[in-house]
């Protein structure tokens, strides 16, 4: 049985399919240390000081009034968070920005707009598949730059090279949790779920819709989950294997 990958209960893309987003938005602030969350016609921009010069990644949590849940990772550079996110549904949404245990922002926004397609949803960065983090995006573009194929077959070639790169450069490791793509890239090691999240993030950074899927397995009488990658190639979803 194949299912969407839901890692550490913080990303459930399957629950987002068919929901609406990317429209006109308004925001109301509640408790906030620095009130710098703004809205445009289709995005929410965040510009917040963290109170420390440390780098790292901030967590942005979106929670709709009907229980939809999504998380982004935004880089912290020189004590500042400066990024743009998309709310992948319509209606009232709570937005929280945290740096570890520290709450930086907490606002409400209302978004009204057209529905995102499944492919658009599977291009969005997420907290684990953080294709928006500079190191991930830079690595994705470096991998894709080796592809000389042109035209409609280019994305297929990029997907193939990307999967091979992860297999060759990311060592297998036992993990008790799934790491973000940027963490796996930095350590060059990860479990199957972490390597899958990295492969998906690299593909999304190259503008190829991709998603992680899990299949139930049984070995020695024990159940487990095996992860692989689906990518939107040549107008259809293709399973391109396990990195």
Image: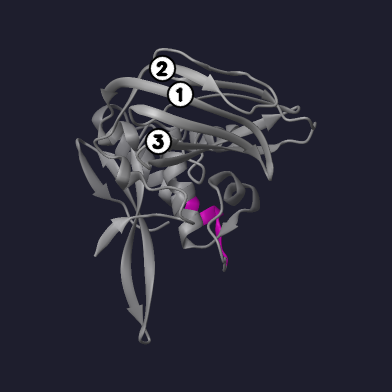
The kind of secondary structure element at disc 1 is strand
User: Residue 79 shows which numbered tag?
Assistant: none
* Label 3 Cα neighbours within 10 Å, binned few <14 / some 14-19 / many ≥20: many
Gap between marks 2 and 1 measured at Cα: 6 Å
* Label 2 Cα neighbours within 10 Å, binned few <14 / some 14-19 / many ≥20: many
Q: Which residue is mark 1?
A: 109
Residue at screen point 46% across, 59% down:
193
Q: Which residue is mark 2?
A: 25
Left/right of residue 185 with respect to residue 193 in the rendered view: right
Q: Find residue 39 and report its horizontal and vertical position in percent.
A: 48, 16
Along the line of sight, the residue nearer the viewer: 131 or 21: 21
Q: Give residue 147's quadrant in the image.
A: top left
Q: Is residue 238 above or below residue 132?
A: below
Q: Which residue is mark 3?
A: 64
Q: Is residue 1 above or below residue 19?
A: below
Q: Quadrant of the N terminus?
A: bottom left
Callout count: 3
Does residue 167 appear in the picture of this structure?
Answer: no
Q: Which residues are magenta?
A: 165-173
Q: Give residue 43's quadrant in the image.
A: top left
Does residue 19 appear in the picture of this structure?
Answer: yes
| Label 2 vs 1, first from the N-terminus | 2
Q: Are marks 2 and 1 in contact (CB under 8 Å)?
A: yes
Q: Find residue 36 and report its horizontal and vertical position in percent.
A: 62, 18
Q: Find residue 48 and report its horizontal and vertical position in percent.
A: 66, 24
């Amino acid at each position: 049985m194949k299912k969407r990958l839901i890692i550490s209960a913080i990303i459930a893309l399957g629950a987002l399919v068919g929901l609406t987003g990317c429209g006109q938005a308004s925001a109301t602030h509640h408790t906030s240390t620095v009130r710098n969350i703004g809205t445009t016609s289709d995005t929410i921009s965040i510009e917040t000081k963290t109170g420390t010069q440390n780098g790292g990644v901030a967590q942005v949590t979106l929670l709709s009034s009907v229980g939809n849940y999504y998380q982004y990772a935004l880089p912290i550079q020189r004590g500042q968070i400066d990024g743009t996110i998309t709310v992948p549904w319509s209606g009232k949404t709570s937005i929280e920005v945290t740096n570890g245990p520290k709450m930086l922002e907490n606002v409400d926004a209302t978004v009204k707009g057209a529905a995102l397609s499944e492919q658009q949803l599977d291009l969005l960065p997420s907290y684990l598949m953080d294709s928006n983090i500079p190191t991930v995006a830079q690595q994705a573009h470096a991998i894709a730059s080796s592809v000389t194929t042109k035209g409609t077959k280019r994305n297929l070639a990029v997907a193939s090279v990307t999967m091979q790169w992860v297999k060759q450069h990311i060592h297998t490791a036992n993990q008790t949790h799934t790491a973000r793509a940027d963490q796996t890239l930095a350590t060059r090691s990860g479990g199957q779920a972490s390597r899958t999240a990295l492969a998906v993030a690299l593909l999304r950074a190259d503008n190829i819709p991709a998603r992680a899927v899990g299949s139930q397995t049984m070995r020695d009488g024990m159940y487990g989950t095996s992860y692989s990658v689906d990518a939107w190639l040549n107008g259809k979803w293709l399973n391109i294997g396990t990195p």
